[in-house]
Image (cartoon, grey):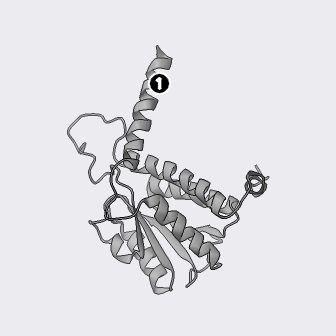
Amino acid sequence: MADDSMSSLASQICNHIASAFTASTSPHPPPLTVLVDEISVTAGRGGRIFLYGVGREGLMLRALCMRLFHLGLSAHLVFDMNTPPISQPDLLIASAGPGCFSTVDAICGVARSSGARVVLLTAQPELGSSVKYANAVAYVPAQTMADDGNGGNGQRSLLPMGSVYEGAMFVLFEMVVFKLGELLNQSPQEIRSRHTNLE
């Protein structure tokens, strides 16, 4: 019985996350296309990739940063002690699921003023202040804290607050890594060879 319950919950969660990829992103291009194009163009011109997000969004971007490094790209997390300065050939990928965060706005503003391109991941491309800093928008049509509908109504949601958006980020990033591996002609062996051995 416990196994059935666990399987049922897992299916419901996966189906809820999958719904973010069946919803239309028009007039924006699909987020997979935006991210793969921007990252591959940046790599082609010798630029570095910087990533920033708050909270659980930031954790998903940390996971992407790790895989970009495994793909042989120069990838850096904003606020790490060894993060270099951003400049013209570089790309910042930032996330503001609900449309804006003051730190995202500030960091995107610095990146733009330094000549870097900015890609903004968001579930609210028409709202908030962060989109004004973006050269490109990766629209992920998933529930965030801005529209979860559970602010104090007493009902429990299987995926509360921004969990759908954050789960969709993880799935999207796995697709991005898969596509980039093909584009960059990286074999599984090459990717594995860059994994740390200090664990």
Mark yes or no: residue 103 visible. yes
Q: Quick check: 164 left or right of 191?
A: left
Q: Is residue 37 above or below residue 177?
A: below
Residue 14 point in image, percent of width and height: 44, 37
Q: Nearer the viewer, residue 52 or 186?
A: 186
Residue 117 point in image, percent of width and height: 49, 78
Residue 145 point in image, percent of width and height: 31, 51
Residue 48, located in which quarter of the rendered image? bottom right
Give neighbour class at mark 1: few <14, some 14-19, many 20+ (Cα, 10 Å). Answer: few
Q: Nearer the viewer, residue 106 or 65?
A: 65
* Residue at image coords 50%, 64%: 35
Q: Quick check: 8 left or right of 50?
A: left
- Quick one: which residue is furthest to the left in this view? 153
Q: Is residue 49 above or below residue 192?
A: below
Three-letter residue code for mark 1: Met
Residue 37 point in image, percent of width and height: 53, 68
Residue 150, located in which quarter of the rendered image? top left
* Residue at image coords 44%, 75%: 108
Residue at numbered disc 1: 6
